[in-house]
Amino acid sequence: MKYSSLIRILFFLFFGIFLISCEVDDKPEVYEEGSNKYTNDWIYNQMKKYYKWNETMPDKGDLAVNPKEYFNRLLNKSDVYSYAVNPNLPETVPQSLRRNFGFDISFVEYQSKIYGVILYALEDSPAKNNGLLRGQLITEINGEELNLSNYEKIYKSIISANHLDLKVVSYSKETGFSKPESVSLLQGFSFSQPIFPKVFTNNNTKIGYVEIPHFDVGQAKLFQQIFQELKDQNITELVLDLRYNGGGDVSSATALSIIIAPNIIASDLFIQFEGNKNGGLVKQSFQQALESNERNVSFDLLKNVHPDIKKVYILCGKRTASASEIMINNLRPFMDVITIGEKTVGKDVAGFPIEDDRNPNTKGWILYPSIYKLFNAKHEGDYSSGINPSIAVDELQEPEIFPLGNRSELLLNTAINMQSGNTKKVKTTTARSLPLSKIYIDADPLLVKP
């Protein structure tokens, strides 16, 4: 055999072995179904594809750790909104007083005592069904009297509780403090909330007031009915109360925006979603954003109930987030938006659920990552530190807190006074709001499908 022929044979033999070796090395590792490695490998691949900050993600690392811990390791330091849930592990579900009991509280100092102020109690919730009302003051929680050194620790401890024992008092300027009452709550569900619009007359001007507790899927028809009523009553001013609205469905917020914004057409750009290199920049008109999750009511039907308004007063605060902030930011290119209250949360990101459905017989982990940064028609956004109000007002500066929609309630009263040209701030401040390092609002995703 010639030397050159031998070399040729050896070359092809070596090359064949090399190809087989490469093929074996390139084959992805297979993990045991149901193991942490199996789950975490899936988590990593989904995040690498969808996550807004996928380029800053670390390497895969140790896939054997707990999936919740593994997911958190992948997050950008600036991202405080992404989370992962396992339906089979209740402890992985984000907790809040609203989710568990149907109410929320803040804290004030009044006459050297600390009180938890009930901000709202949802209809047909454990809180409302046991007599809790907005404005009531809590003095004790689970047998512990509130003071400056323990109120935040207590607040954090009750977020995941399944029962609460409260001591509650009421206060008014006329009668002072009532006798303490004991109220016990068991964890329970609160469902979609009714909306009760009101109309006030001020100097011959009719003012509509609407408080939206949350943006739920399929609310467009309800919004159409509500604003038909307000239009029939000839309102020329509108106060939209979003101070306790933590967000929800983008299409629902879009439907309300279509009703409120003057002089818009269906093709006008409403929202821009800026993703990673895989997602790119997605632009949606009013109609496209509406139809992404709401097809029961058309753009034209919503537009037909637009009342005769040119501006909107939006009441906002520390629990105004997500889709509510979209309304504030994304209406601004089309009308004057006057915000009254406190700085909003700053959730300028959106996403959609990513479910591990590889096994049809078992519910897997569900990821809620931040996929897009949000911008309005003028590409204005970047409000991750919150949206500052046009008029800063602390609703808890007095110990007497009126019901939402009551004309004497501080933020609503401020809006009504502004419409009559009275912009004087409330001078009396007898209660001091106390800070919380973190407020546990509903961590619901923005259900967008660009």
Image (spheres, rainbow, N blue to C red):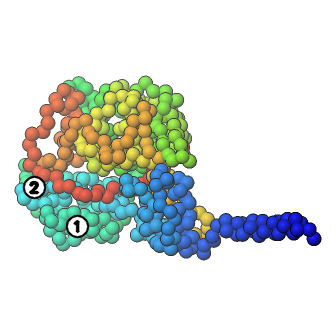
Instruction: Give, as a three-letter code, the residue at label 2.
Output: Tyr
Q: Quadrant of the N terminus?
A: bottom right
The image position of residue 134, as x and y in percent, is 23, 53
Q: Nearer the viewer, residue 11 or 383?
A: 11
Q: In whole angstroms, how far apart are the C-alphas of marks 1 and 2?
A: 19 Å
Instruction: Give, as a three-letter code, the residue at label 1.
Output: Ile
Q: Residue at x 14, y 63 (%)?
A: 148
- Horizontally, is 79 left or right of 205 in the view? right
Kindly check if marks 1 and 2 are in contact, taking CB atoms under 8 A apart as contact: no
Few, some or many residues within 10 Å of mark 1 (<14, 14–19, 20+): some
- Horizontally, is 201 left or right of 23 in the view? left
Q: Mark 1 or mark 2: which comes first in sequence?
A: 2
The image position of residue 416, as x and y in percent, is 22, 33
Q: Nearer the viewer, residue 133 or 56?
A: 56
Q: Secondary structure at mark 2?
A: strand
Reading the image, the residue beneath label 1 is 154
The image position of residue 433, as x and y in percent, is 16, 52
Residue 360 seen by the camera = no
Few, some or many residues within 10 Å of mark 2 (<14, 14–19, 20+): some
Q: Residue at x 19, y 64 (%)?
A: 151
- Horizontally, is 243 left or right of 229 in the view? left
- Horizontally, is 43 left or right of 336 in the view? right
Reading the image, the residue beneath label 2 is 110
The image position of residue 146, as x and y in percent, is 15, 65
Residue 24 seen by the camera = yes
Q: Nearer the viewer, residue 291 or 154?
A: 154
Q: Residue at x 42, y 63 (%)?
A: 72
